[in-house]
Image (cartoon, helix red, strand yellow):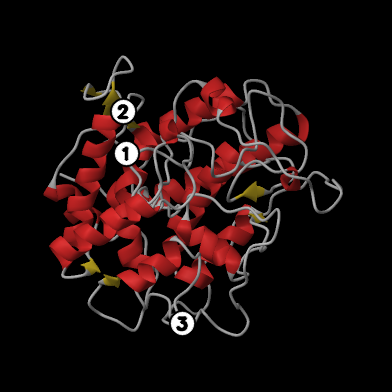
Amino acid sequence: MISKAFVVLTTLLFSFNVLSTSLAFPNDPELLKRQEIEGTSSSNGGGFGAVNPPPPPGPPRFTGTKLVHDRAHPWKPLRKGDERGPCPGMNTLASHGYISRDGVASPSQMVTAVQEGLNMENQFAIFVTYLAHLMNGNLVTDLLSIGGKTRKTGPDPPPPAHAGGFNVHGTFEGDGGMTRADAFFGDNHSFNETLFQKFVDFSNQYGDGYYNLTVAGELRFQRLQDSIATNPQFSFKNVRYFTGYGESAFPINFFVDGRKTDRKLDMASARSFFKDMRFPPDFHRTPKPSSNEGIAEIFGMHPFLPGGNADGKVNNFMVDPASADFTKPCVLYEDIVKTLQGLYPNPTGVLKRNLIKNLGFLHSSLSAALGAQCDQLFPYGQL
């Protein structure tokens, strides 16, 4: 039986490779560090100070359909130094000014943005945002890049931690993405036209030219088979297992105009989000707060156990029985905490305080969204 984990833990984030989003957490912090992207120059001259992170925002007052491609949020082209990454949802929100157009913001600002621009459900938004922040953000300055590593988030934390942004492979981006290539092939965060054409082909074959749940189930399974056959380092387990299915449902839940009731995404709108990072003209958000509706249907078409290619060989997929899956949501939480302990073995001062606070935000949203009573872990103590 599939648990409520389907409803909460499988997007992105962010959305999150329709995201090629992946939060597959290897327990080797050095792997994360090796994947960092070189930073660009800071636009504010490096004037950063420690921030005491505020609690995440609650739900907005109005949660219905409304125009979000409006005069207050016009699309603007990228400027030199602006950050964009593997999540088309966050890329689009930044290009329309729902967060800073340079692609760097606090987690509180990001939660507000995905609620206002996409009508994402509050607890789901908090979970995926603070998870990304804990793994890829600067916990002292309370800033996170939606793309690569940048000095705009402030001075680096002590190694092996990093503030590498969404582009870091194995934390918010992962293998088997729909419009982004696997990291093994070089570029894991840019729009890939070849993969998008596969998205179009499957929509034509299974959805009469639209992306729907049937297309999502077939394409998700095919992308897994593609990676097994071509990527000797393919990994699809733990958080990536959840987000991989979540990213398949994300376009149906958030990229279809809220005035439509058929839950079908046309190809022009898909290209607008995935490639151009732009709301379609006159776009209205979904009519009610959403998270990962449709995940069970997508998974049920081709059930797939978590695992990866073993021994650095293609076509050598092995199931990982220790991985979290949809029946074991608390194992996912435990894996996240274990990974953080590797990244932050001995935090002190402001870093320790902010780490404890952000872990508290993560846990409260996880429990509320899952309906699962996962015991809260305190590797760094309590405030």
Which badge, 1 or 3, comes first in the chain's sequence?
Answer: 1
Q: Residue at x 48, y 25 (%)?
A: 338
Q: CA distance from mark 1 to mark 3?
A: 33 Å
Q: CA distance from mark 1 to mark 2?
A: 9 Å
Q: Residue furthest front?
A: 194
Disc 1 residue type?
A: Tyr
Quarter holding residue 341: top right
Q: Which residue is mark 3?
A: 281
Few, some or many residues within 10 Å of mark 3 (<14, 14–19, 20+): few
Which badge, 3 or 2, comes first in the chain's sequence?
Answer: 3
- Observer-side mark, 1 or 2, equals 1
Few, some or many residues within 10 Å of mark 1 (<14, 14–19, 20+): many
Q: Are marks 1 and 2 in contact (CB under 8 Å)?
A: yes
Q: Nearer the viewer, residue 19 or 76?
A: 76
Disc 3 residue type?
A: Pro
In this rendering, does residue 231 appear at all?
A: yes
Rendered-image quadrant of the C terminus: top right
> How far across and down, in percent of the image, does residue 303 sit?
15, 41
- 355 on left or right of 154: left
Q: Which mark is residue 323?
A: 2
> How far across and down, in percent of the image, does residue 208 sit?
16, 70
Q: Residue at x 58, y 59 (%)?
A: 110
Establish if 155 lies above or below 127: above
